[in-house]
Amino acid sequence: MTSTSTLPGEAPPASAASGTYTLTSRLARGGAFRDGQLTTRYGAVRLGALTPGAEAALRALGEDDHDEAAIGALIVAHDGETGLLRWHILRSRLEAAGLVEHAVAGPDGAAVARLVTVGRGATTLKPAPRGPVRLSRHALLSPAEGTLALRAPGSPLAVELGAGATALLPLLTTWTREAPAPLVRLLATAGALAPGGPDADPQAEERGSVQWHPLDLAFHARTRVPASAPGYGGTYRHRERFGPEPVAAPAADGPRVALPVPDLEAIAARDLSLTEAIEQRTSTRAHDPEHPLTLAQLAELLYRTVRIRGTFTGSDGQELADRPLPSGGAVHELEVYPLVTRCEGLEPGLYRYAPDRHELERVGAPGPATATLVKEARGGTMMDGDPQVVLLVAARFGRVMWKYETVAYPLILKHVGVLYQTVYLVATAMGLAVCGLGGGDTSAFAAATGRDPLLEGTVGELVIGSRPAGPAATDTDTAAATAAATGAAAAPAAERATEPAAADF
């Protein structure tokens, strides 16, 4: 490549980009052409009548990478010059269906990068942008199939990088004109290049780009753009490897606490109406130390919100549940762990609520691990004292991931939101103080419970206690937000920066 002058903010010329880089193509992985039939990872594809040149080209592309000149020569040898137009039409159709992938061969002939489909999208190459280019600040690099894959959020394509690309990537971390044009075309097609230039960089200036962290945007796009994922919804991706988990976790060997069953008819007679509960609902960040929450109140709250009312078996063989709150596919993966600091009739410690038996299983006594969880909840709610009870909401991830692909984790988060609202309304009707937290530490939960965080981990937290009388009872979301803004929280600023924020409910 020839040397060029650089613009402010551009990378200087680098010898790593020198030499000849060539675009090549082949059938997408899983594709082959045999006996007049094109097979792909999606199944057989009907192509209609093909010329001898087109058949020869498809066989060649099914075996290895070839550049355009080599394929063109093959077409001309069988069909003459007139066969090129028909071949280009067929090739465009295959690219539009994502059945052809492209690669860049370096000066030594080895593949530097390869454009592949990871979802469902076209692989038609875009022209190289004019002017300087750089990688998008939202592009992510991750291991895949024995290589590293560069991908932009929401794109159905990824660029797999060979060994020869390691010297080229640093060029693209800032604006440059020195990146090989074939590589730039692959990155542009995958959506991994930033728009603009050093004097007009929307990703560094525009609100819609700046506010999104790359990991957050990748999560959002992957779960809300179905075409960007290989599978979406109830695909039962690992059904052959793992069986479904039971709807209720197996009973533990430790001590159990039987809970009283509330009288729902009596409750219905005295309860607030739904409209009243919704209108009175607020976050209360203070508890009554003279009259703490009772075991009967905790039992009623758990019974009315998360108990299992019944079970049944789905058509896929998975055991499902009926609970007072809804759940996608009726999988009900959420578990509630009451962390008790002060509750009349119940020893302090960490418990798991068994929703199928309406009882508490003691997980552990108070100690350093539970103290960390209490401190986080206290800091997150900006309370003056320890909360009486923290409801740690955990998810048994396999319950959802056995069936759902791509949408599994966002579905869990939707369930957490449903649980929050259900607990808020029931607690309001019961006259209890409730406050949801906006974040938590699943590693602290793992330390306190011994649970494998990849199998079960916290996804939400709520603080529950007795509602104080008087002005403290009106400790609303707005008041807490004002206290935080004026520095009225008890914890020092350096400490507050590491604490989970109370959800602004």
Image (cartoon, grey):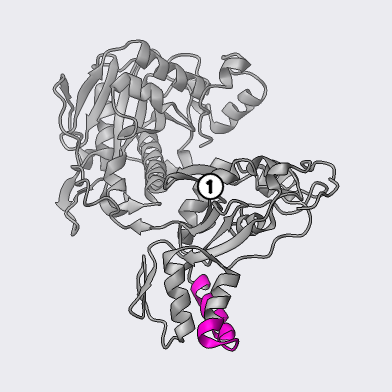
Q: Nearer the viewer, residue 287 or 323?
A: 323
Q: Can residue 282 be spotted in the picture?
A: yes
Identify the residue at image location x=38%, y=63%.
30
> Within 10 angstroms of label 1, few (less than 14), some, or many (20 or more) residues?
some
Q: In the image, 228: left or right of 340?
A: right
Q: Main secondary structure of the magenta part?
A: helix
Q: In the image, 351: left or right of 4?
A: left
- Place residue 364 in its image quadrant: top left
Horizontal and vertical percent position of residue 394:
33, 33
- Place residue 87 in its image quadrant: bottom right
| Range shown magenta | 76-95
Q: Nearer the viewer, residue 426 or 376?
A: 376
The residue wearing badge 1 is 162
Q: In the image, 306: left or right of 72?
A: left
Q: Nearer the viewer, residue 339 or 475?
A: 339
Residue 55, magenta (yes or no): no
- Place residue 249 in its image quadrant: top left
Horizontal and vertical percent position of residue 14:
74, 42
